[in-house]
Image (tube, rainbow, N blue to C red):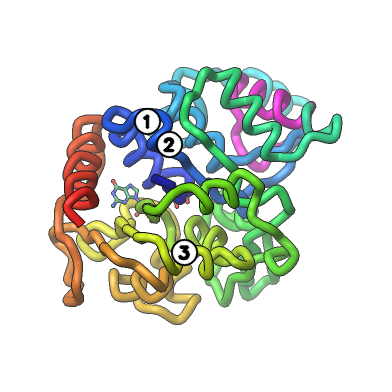
């Protein structure tokens, strides 16, 4: 199975899936449109959360960074007058240095992630959606900015007029992504932001076409008609769709099994179950029910 992932909702589901599936039954294609360079290193927030989740070292409270990490370098840089746009932990930064050193020596993002996954003893396949630069840009009344500048720098407060994916027209799916599309029949669109996490993966040239003959399962990122966290509702409204499961469904396109939370007001054809994952036990329960449903079809 291929899972399309962002950096919070889907990793929660991966916590459960990795317990139930053999490593070669679970491959993850991860959004890269939130990637950015900070203090000389490439930060790939969604890929890192997926890697940390599969390696068992994710901070499962905040859903970014490594659990128990320290922030000595970030704090010392601050005392020197250098403000980093993201609070980077020390061990997290070591991962960024590992990856960026490979990229500086000419490796592709895919090769760097592969090396990182091996170094972290991860057995599942984790691939970036593309090796080409793609950035989610947010247009606000005071101008256009990168996703991270909007969400972290401006704390997600400015009004959102529109969004665009800079570089998407010329980006190709990564070689690992194309290989998975050749091999796998089931694609799970995880419970991640449909605009800024799943949207960029689906928007890569040729991807929607390749999904036509696959079984597409989607788990909505809305619980009780609302995002559990993050800016999904605001971004959906800016895309001209209602901020509910109707809107999620219309953004995703072809979906064969649409899983919504039991409290959703969605009226269309769907599978209803509790999709809230606050603990490892809940993640496992959601994954278990989901896998049973997929195997029944
Ligand atoms: P980002 O890359 O950090 O923006 O993270 P994602 O796009 O992967 O995840 C954000 C989305 O995950 C939000 O729209 C949340 O509503 C959704 N989400 C977070 N936790 C849960 C959960 O426990 N269940 C479900 N169904 N969705 C969740």
Location of mark 2 (residue): 63
**Where is residue 22 drawn, in percent x and y?**
35, 29
Location of mark 3 (residue): 211
Q: CA distance from mark 3 to mark 1?
A: 31 Å
Number of the label disc, if any, that sits on residue 60? 1
Residue 63 within the segment the image draws in magenta = no
**Where is residue 251 drawn, in percent x and y?**
42, 72
Count the numbered circles shown: 3
**Where is residue 169 drawn, in percent x and y?**
71, 69
Mark 3 or 2, closer to the camera: 3
Residue farthest along the bottom direction in this orientation:
240
Q: Regarding mark 1 in the picture, which secondary structure is present there?
A: loop
Q: Earlier in the sequence, mark 3 or mark 1?
A: 1
Mark 2 touching mark 1, by CB under 8 A?
yes
- The CB of the residue at mark 2 lies under 8 Å from ligand 1: yes
Q: At x 60% / y 18%, what residue is drawn? A: 119
> Start and end of the magenta stretch?
81-101
**Quarter of the view holding residue 173:** bottom right
Q: Earlier in the sequence, mark 3 or mark 2?
A: 2
Q: Mark 1, residues whose alpha carbon is within 10 Å: few (<14), some, or many (≥20)?
A: many
Mark 3 or 1, closer to the camera: 3
Whether residue 198 is situated above or below residue 284 in the rendered picture: below
* Residue 75 in sight in this render: no
Q: At x 40% / y 29%, what residue is drawn? A: 23
Q: Mark 2, residues whose alpha carbon is within 10 Å: few (<14), some, or many (≥20)?
A: some
Of residue 114 and residue 199, the one placed in the foreground of this image is 114
- Name the side, left or right, on which 12 lies relative to 77: left
């Amino acid at each position: 199975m291929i899972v399309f992932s962002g950096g919070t909702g889907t990793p929660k589901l991966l916590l459960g899936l990795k317990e139930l599936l053999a490593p070669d039954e679970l491959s993850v294609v991860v959004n890269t449109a939130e990637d950015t360079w900070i203090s000389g290193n490439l930060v790939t927030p969604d890929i890192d959360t997926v890697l940390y989740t599969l390696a068992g070292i994710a901070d499962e409270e905040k859903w970014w960074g490594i659990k128990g990490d320290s922030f000595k370098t970030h704090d010392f840089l601050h005392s020197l007058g250098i403000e980093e746009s993201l609070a980077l932990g020390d061990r997290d930064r070591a991962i960024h240095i590992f990856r960026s050193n490979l990229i500086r020596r000419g490796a592709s993002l895919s090769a760097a992630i592969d090396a990182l996954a091996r170094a972290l003893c991860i057995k599942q396949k984790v691939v970036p959606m593309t090796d080409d630069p793609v950035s989610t840009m947010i247009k606000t009344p005071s101008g256009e900015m990168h996703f991270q500048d909007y969400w972290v720098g401006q704390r997600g407060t400015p009004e959102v007029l529109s969004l665009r994916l800079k570089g998407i027209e010329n980006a190709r799916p990564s070689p690992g992504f194309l290989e998975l599309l050749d091999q796998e029949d089931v694609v799970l669109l995880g419970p991640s932001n449909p605009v800024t996490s799943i949207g960029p993966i689906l928007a890569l040239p040729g991807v929607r076409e390749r999904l036509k003959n696959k079984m597409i399962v989607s788990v909505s990122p809305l619980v009780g008609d609302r995002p559990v966290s993050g800016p999904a509702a605001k971004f959906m409204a800016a895309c001209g769709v209602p901020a509910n499961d109707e809107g999620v469904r219309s953004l995703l396109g072809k979906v064969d099994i649409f899983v919504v939370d039991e409290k959703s007001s969605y009226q269309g054809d769907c599978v209803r179950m509790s999709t809230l994952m606050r603990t490892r036990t809940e993640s496992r329960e959601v994954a278990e029910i989901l896998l049973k449903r997929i195997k029944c079809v």
